[in-house]
Amino acid sequence: MAAVFPTWILIAALLFEAAVVMGSFPATLKLERKIPLASHELELSQLRERDRLRHGRLLQSSSGGVVDFPVMGTYDPFLVGLYYTKVQLGSPPREFYVQVDTGSDVLWIGCNSCNGCPQSSGLQIQLNLYDPGSSSTASLVSCSDQRCSAGLQSSDSGCSAQSNQCSYTFQYGDGSGTSGYYVADLLHFNSILEGSVITNSTAPIMFGCSVLQTGDLTKSDRAVDGIFGFGQQSLSVISQLSSQGITPKVFSHCLKGSNSGGGILVFGEILEPNMVYTPLVRSQPHYNLDLRSISVGGQVLSINPSVFSTSNNQGTIVDSGTTLAYLADEAYDAFMSAITNAVSQTVRPILSKGNQCYLITSSVNDIFPQVSLNFAGGASMILNPQDYLVQQNSIGGSASWCIGFQKIQGQRITILGDLVLKDKIFVYDLVNQRIGWTNYDCSMSVNVSTNINTGRTEFVNAGQMSNDGSSRDQVRGMLALLLPIIMLTGLLFL
């Protein structure tokens, strides 16, 4: 036995070294995080206007593996101001860039006969139009299709009596919109199953084929091929895949806040020990949360709780399709007053094009207080200064940081956009009707679970490992892969 031990250790070490050289493991999916920067900057006033128009178009109205999508883009409003991903559709599959939008339900793509679809993008990505005629697996969706009937209930679909075609028209508050018809085709995706084995998978889904776009949707500065709605209605992709038993009815994202952007987007539950959850407000068209109060520097602000109550036209919404964050009048005024009072002895406040800004010569973390959004069930969302401030420019030797929270005039609506959502894990548990979060470095890998029919929980490494910052995760992954080989080798020498 004494002579055997060094031998199999040597073999294991050689295998370990070989694995290091290979540098790739089945349990790891590489998520794209780098994005070419836009060629121009936007003013905060333009961003507010764009978000206002976006808010006008918020749509009213047993499990398998973990599905993983690449994430590109960044929250930074002066660079990109949105997060987007790639989907593959059709046979043969073609790639399309789509905005990640938790404020709507439907996946729709601009189609080859589209009138008003942008031909180029300031994001420096290649735009494509979907052509159902060139896909051997595409089919039109008729009015009699039960999926079309289900969409009628949530105003996500309509029906043309003349053509018997399931269609849609999404008219937005700014006068822009999109319309088209529904098709069924194959979605291609990476699915992690059976002990973290990655397989190429397909599933039939129904999605929109847009033939008309108007207003801001025709502009090319931040144009993508379509919108990927992550809502919970029946026509969302997450609902369709879960109803087929392909994925759990839960998805998670971790949006990276640095300039390089990117992040993690999975159909599955990201697991972290510090996650806190709050219930979703039921029977709402969006992801509405019950916000109870706001604290600044540990002090609860004096805001009437009715400001945050939920009804048809008010409440707190989680929306990845919004760049900044928004508060109702009363909440915004109290918030601004508290922030200004907390830093009045340290920084110089200025007004820059109507925005409350501050000239700072040191780190914002040393000056500005933490903010806490306090929700039902005792869950609090901790916001560091970078989660409510936006760096606009530099004046002399000082940096100009502006309040990224904006006021919504005359409406009791709170919208948590990318400014707040970034640098946090968010889990949308649609089965248990709750949303959870925790602050997190979204450049790190994550563990994702999916409850499958056997009752097991599978753990997978669904995040990108950086070349220099995740060696500990790499070693852990290598050891997990080599342990069965080491044990087998040891037995052979017994």
Image: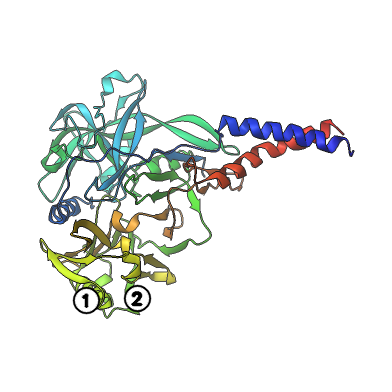
Disc 1 marks which residue? Answer: 337
The image quarter containing residue 417 is bottom left
**Residue 102: image location, x then y, percent:** 31, 50
The kind of residue tagged 1 is: Ser
Q: Is residue 459 in view from this perspective?
A: no
Instruction: Point out which mark residue 285 bears.
Output: none
1 or 2: tag closer to the N-terminus: 2
In this picture, is 196 found above or below 385?
A: above
The kind of residue tagged 2 is: Gly
Residue drawn at x 22%, y 72% as measured from the top left? 336
Q: Quadrant of the C terminus?
A: top right
Residue drawn at x 13%, y 51% as measured from the top left? 173
SS class, disc 2: loop
Disc 2 marks which residue? Answer: 297
User: Looking at the image, which is closer to me, 13 or 237?
Assistant: 13
**Residue 129: image location, x then y, percent:** 23, 27
User: Looking at the image, which is closer to me, 17 or 339?
Assistant: 17
Cβ atoms under marks 1 and 2 closer than 8 Å: no
